[in-house]
Image (spheres, rainbow, N blue to C red):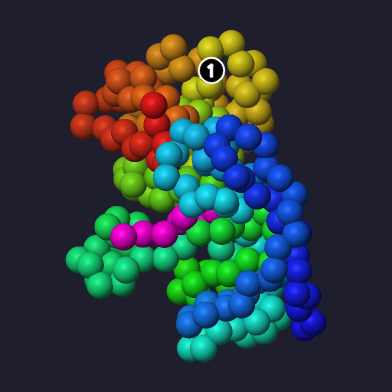
Amino acid sequence: MRIPHVMRAMVLERPGEPLRLQRMRVPAPGQGQVLIRVRACGVCRTDLHIVDGELTAPKLPLIPGHEIVGEVAAAGPGVERFAIGQRVGVPWLGHTCGVCEYCLSGQENLCDAPEFTGYTLDGGFCEYTLADQNFCFALPDVYADAEAAPLLCAGLIGYRSYRMAGQGSHRIGIYGFGAAAHIIAQVAAHNGQQVFAFTRPGDQDAQAFALRSGAEWAGGSDQMPPQPLDAALIFAPVGALVPAALRAVRKGGTVVCGGIHMS
């Protein structure tokens, strides 16, 4: 695979400003890293939090983007998991220390010294990007590039929140009906669970989308569901939804805060 010396990238120089198209040198992979030719990269709500300055510690200048699908163009020393030309995906969590109690117990997401793709590490709004081989996924061919990209963040956090709701949850409420919600609503409906969707009050388009995605009821976040919930998943970045969800959930139920940023 021929790798150019220069690539195009969309760069955030300061929060609150538009991304700028720049030409940059293609980076070389280091120990344990792969160089990925980007084929697709989704836009996540977290990217907007970073650009808007609501997540306050990005590396600057920064190439955002953490729903990356691409192919391995080059490999650094010690790379054994992937071959040149293999299709891979890169998610939000980009690196951890590997030695703290959380990393050693399979809870890398709680590492005290993490690095994040498109936040503290350059991401995928470019033609080539670097990634740690241990934080990449091999992707099945059943998904096209654009279909696979949202699964690397919305799909991951949605499924993890859904799993934390518990096996016995039959009535599940979802607050904030965006990317993660519309994926997990389909999963829950497929598994025979009842889905209750909560959107911004009066957002009829989102409510109609929720009903098409498998919800059996959709209303505003200021409403109570027709039945008490076994669990509630909160994906919207609105702290006031936590007490609202607690009121909607039955005694002994579960409320999961699934987002990265919340007011």
Residue 258 in view, yes or no: yes
For the stretch drawn in magenta, what is the main secondary structure?
A: loop
Q: Which residue is disc 1 drawn over?
A: 200
The reply to whether the magenta stretch includes residue 118 is yes
Quarter residue 210 falls in: top right
Name the residue rendered at 61%, 53% in the picture: 63
Magenta part of the protein: which range? 113-120
**Residue 124: percent from left, percent from top:** 64, 58
204 or 62, nearer to the observer: 62
Q: Residues within 10 Å of mark 1 (few under 14, many from 20)?
A: some
How many numbered markers are drawn?
1
**Residue 151: percent from left, percent from top:** 58, 53
261 or 197, nearer to the observer: 261
Quarter residue 45 falls in: top right
Residue 226 is left or right of residue 38, and the answer is left
Residue 59 is left or right of residue 227, and the answer is right
Name the residue rendered at 50%, 34% in the picture: 53
**Residue 123: percent from left, percent from top:** 59, 57
Residue 171 is left or right of residue 38, and the answer is left
Q: Secondary structure at mark 1?
A: loop
Is the C terminus in the top left, top right, bottom left or bottom right quadrant? top left
Residue 228 in view, yes or no: no
Residue 44 is left or right of residue 260, and the answer is right
Name the residue rendered at 25%, 72% in the picture: 99
Residue 50, above or below 79: above
Residue 166, above or below 175: below
Name the residue rendered at 29%, 35% in the picture: 254
The reply to whether the magenta stretch includes residue 14 is no
**Residue 2: percent from left, percent from top:** 79, 82
87 or 223, nearer to the observer: 87
Is the N terminus in the top left, top right, bottom left or bottom right quadrant? bottom right
Indicate the amino acid at tag 1: Arg
